[in-house]
Image (cartoon, coloured by chain):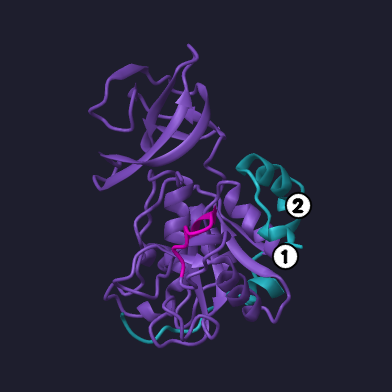
Amino acid sequence: MPRPEEEPITSDEAREHVKGWEKEREFKKGSKHDQDTVDEPVDKEG
Amino acid sequence: MLTPYQPPKSSQNDGISGWTLRCVDNGAVMATDRATVGRIRPKAIAIRKKTGVEGRGITYGEAADAVQALYGVTLMPMHLESRLELRNLIVSGRGAAISIDTNVTAGTIRRTNSFRGHHTVYANDAELVPNGGCRCEANIATAHWEFLIDDPGTTFAGFQWWSADLVYRACERRTGGNGINVLAGKDTEAVKWSGRAKGRIRKEPSTDAAPLGPITVGLVYPGGRTQNGGAWKRADGTTATGWIHVQTPGGKWGWINGRRLAHA
């Protein structure tokens, strides 16, 4: 059975889904999740 | 399939000292450009200077605060709990910088040169491709989801389709399987817009197209999709190509360029 993220969805359906949790997912500057977004230096052009 | 307005690639290899650390800065450039449909195209170095951070990568929170202060544009740092949430966030009509570990993409044709480590790329769209429609690195014969990604860590590769599986695994490696971190712009598809500058509504997404009437400053227009179209000038004289499909007060649908609208 396909996992939920593999099923088809319309943009309207996705928008309704996002409305249900988007505010709860926001994190603040300096939080643990924020610190996890600090990147390492990439090496060279290409 | 129709894709939303796609901002130009923003490569971190801009020749300015410290470029190797500016993945997040350049992801924020593209997220801001997409969210404003071309009206605002920050310079990555301006975001960096506003944060005051030197000698390390900046966080999504620092980037969001800098973009808000410089341009009045809201980018939201988010910790998503599942693959489904990431897929639906992008399908809903948002562009987002996403946090990955390139140890997952290394060895594929979507690698960031020879770099292995913590990195940020930008996602502009997600689509379910049908049997035989694969454009991603995995050459999959059956229907599957793909994300349209630009990697600021590359110079010559532009936007490319990545398999959703590769995106999910790269995001989850970064957090040790504890969710997915993103820096998301506002939804640009099927949302309401407010007239912010005088001009004309056009029959097609081009300044040369037939006019359908004037734009009323302050009036709220129901919006449809966005897309790239004919070139127009930003307030700073640079060129942009973002257009928004809106419904006129008379019920007709027409196009307005990104400079003349803001989220209602």
Q: CA distance from mark 1 to mark 2?
A: 12 Å
Q: Secondary structure at mark 1?
A: loop
Q: Residue at x 32, y 43 (%)?
A: B241
Pick whichever, B46 or B213, lies toward us: B213
- Say whether residue B129 is left or right of residue A41: right
Q: Residue at x 50, y 80 (%)?
A: B105
Residue B44 position, x and y percent, is: 38, 64
Q: Indicate whether B167 appears above or below B125.
A: below
Say which chain tag 1 marks: B
Q: Which is more toward the observer, B107 or B223? A: B107
**Amino acid carrying mark 1 in the image:** Ser
Identify the residue at horizontal 62%, vertical 79% (top origin). B174
Which segment did they paint magenta?
B123-136
Q: Quadrant of residue B209?
A: top left
> In the image, is residue B211 part of the stretch drawn in magenta?
no
In the rendered image of this protein, which colour is used for chain A? Answer: cyan
Q: Are marks 1 and 2 on the same chain?
A: no
Q: Residue furthest top?
A: B250
Instruction: In the rendered structure, find residue A21 and report the number of the disc placed on it.
Output: 2
Q: Quadrant of residue B243?
A: top left
Residue type at numbered disc 2: Trp
Residue A26 in view: no
Q: Which residue is mark 1?
A: B82
**Residue B221, percent from left and from top:** 51, 24
Residue B119 spot, x, y in % from top left: 51, 77
Dot 2: what SS? Answer: loop
Q: Colour of chain B?
A: purple
